[in-house]
Structure formats: structure tokens, C-alpha cells
């Protein structure tokens, strides 16, 4: 056999060896596949006789707090003071950005029942659902901000709670916007700028 033929034969042999190794590796991986995808484990809510309560899912360790969920400020997270009294002031800075966010969240979650101006005549009410009270009655005008936060958090009457739908920061944004709605429907004309007062008086006299 000539040298060039021997070299060619060696190359072919090496190639066949590599192909055989690769095929063997693929076969071994495919053999492992079922045990990797079908591991021994318990599904949520599955029974497990090992534990005294018979449940595979373990309860949270008492007094543990998930990261980012340390509710150290009761006023912000509950709308109440440490003594359990409803807070009298909104515990965040009220600015245009907060009111805009509150308006957006209010129109999503609240307006269907409470109406866009908070008069209790939302589209759901117009279709037969019992109306909620208007925000513009004296009882709710005089209610502290913590009352509205508490109702959003825990529900009230026919209204279910929104604690799992609306984050605490957004609840305060909604409370701030409710206060703006109440002011918009009951503000004295003297609180408006002079040019606006003149325009309103002119429109009222027509």
C-alpha cells in the first residue's frame, strides 16, 4: 500500500471512530431522558404520609417574611396607625404624578361601579347592580384617607377586597384621586383662579 493510501485509510478510520463515539453518546443521552423528565417529586397539594399533617406542601415557617415584603410601616400598608386607628393623612407625597396614577387605577378598578366622578353610577350600576354610596355625601367627604385604603384592602359590604389586585402604593394613589374627585364636585368658586372665576360666572349668567 502506498503512503498516501495509508494516510487516507487512517483518516477514514478516525472519522468512523468519532462517528461511532458520537452515536453512542446520543444513544446514552436518549436512554437517560425519561428519568430526567419524570423525576420523583410531589405535586402541589399532593398527600405525603411522611409528615404529620399528611401534606407534601409545607407551610411557611412562622414569622418569616418574603424578600421585599417587610411591611414595617403600618400606616402605609394597612391605612391604620400602630394603635389601629385610621390614618388622617395620606402617608405618601401627593403630586401630579401620583394623581395621574390614581386616576388610571381608579378608572380600571373603581369606575365600573363608582362612576367616573365617584357618584356611584358606574356602568355596572346602570345595568342593574346595586349602587355604592356616592363619594360626595357628607359621611365620605369627612371620612379619613385611611377609611378608603382599608375598604380597598379588605372590602366593604358588597365590595370584595382588592388587596391581591392593587398594590399598596396604587391604593394610596387611588385614595388621593378620590380626594381630588371629592374636591372637584364640592369646591367653592372662590378657590379657583380669578380668570376661571370670571369665566364660570359668565357661563352661569347665560
Image: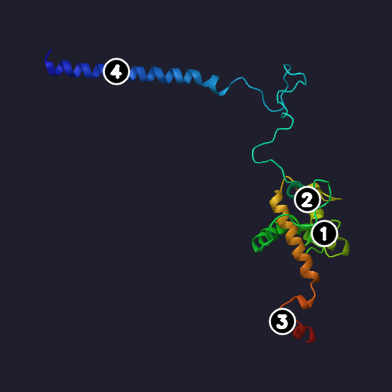
Horizontal and vertical percent position of residue 75 = 76, 49
Residue placed at 71% from the left, 49% from the top? 168
Q: Residues within 10 Å of mark 3 (few under 14, many from 20)?
A: few
Query: How packed is label 2: few (under 14 Cα within 10 Å), some, or many (20 or more)?
Result: many
Per the model, the C-alpha gap separating discs 2 and 4 is: 75 Å
**Above-or-below relation of 200 to 119:** below
The mark that comes first in sequence, 4 or 3, is 4
Q: Nearer the viewer, mark 2 or mark 4?
A: 2
The residue tagged 4 is: 16
Which percent across, then down, holds residue 64?
A: 70, 33
Separation of marks 3 and 2 at Cα, in angstroms: 37 Å
Q: Is residue 174 above or below residue 36?
A: below
Say which of marks 2 and 1 sits in front: 2
**Is the C-beta separation of discs 3 and 1 under 8 Å?**
no
Rendering coords of residue 41 (x, y %): 63, 22
Q: Earlier in the sequence, mark 2 or mark 4?
A: 4
Query: Is residue 102 toward the left or the right of residue 129 in the image?
Result: left
**Residue 194 shows which numbered tag?**
3
Q: CA distance from mark 4 to mark 3?
A: 94 Å
Q: Which image quarter is the C terminus in?
A: bottom right
First in sequence, mark 3 or 1: give its number. 1
Using the numbered discs, state the Cα–Cα distance from disc 4 to disc 1 in whole angstroms: 78 Å
Say whether residue 152 is left or right of residue 170: right
59 vs 133: above or below: above
Q: Which residue is mark 1?
A: 125
Whether residue 116 is visible, yes or no, is: no
Q: Give the number of the disc on residue 79.
A: 2
Tell me the colour scheme of the image: rainbow
Amino acid at each position: 500500500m502506498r503512503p498516501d493510501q495509508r494516510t487516507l485509510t487512517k483518516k477514514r478510520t478516525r472519522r468512523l471512530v468519532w462517528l461511532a463515539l458520537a452515536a453512542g453518546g446520543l444513544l446514552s443521552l436518549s436512554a437517560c431522558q425519561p428519568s430526567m423528565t419524570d423525576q420523583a417529586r410531589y405535586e402541589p397539594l399532593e398527600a405525603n404520609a411522611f409528615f404529620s399533617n399528611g401534606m407534601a406542601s409545607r407551610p411557611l415557617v412562622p414569622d418569616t417574611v418574603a424578600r421585599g415584603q417587610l411591611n414595617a410601616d403600618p400606616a402605609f400598608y394597612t391605612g391604620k396607625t400602630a394603635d389601629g386607628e385610621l390614618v388622617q393623612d395620606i402617608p405618601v407625597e401627593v403630586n401630579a404624578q401620583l394623581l395621574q396614577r390614581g386616576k388610571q387605577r381608579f378608572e380600571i378598578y373603581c369606575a365600573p361601579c363608582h362612576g367616573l366622578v365617584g357618584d356611584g353610577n358606574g356602568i355596572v350600576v346602570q345595568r342593574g347592580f346595586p349602587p355604592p354610596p356616592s363619594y360626595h355625601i357628607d359621611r365620605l367627604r369627612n371620612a379619613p384617607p385611611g377609611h378608603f385604603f382599608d375598604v380597598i384592602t379588605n372590602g366593604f359590604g358588597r365590595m370584595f377586597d382588592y388587596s391581591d389586585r392593587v398594590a399598596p402604593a396604587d391604593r394610596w394613589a387611588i385614595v388621593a384621586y378620590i380626594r381630588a374627585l371629592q374636591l372637584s364636585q364640592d369646591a367653592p368658586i372662590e378657590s379657583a383662579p380669578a380668570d376661571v372665576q370670571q369665566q364660570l360666572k359668565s357661563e352661569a349668567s347665560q
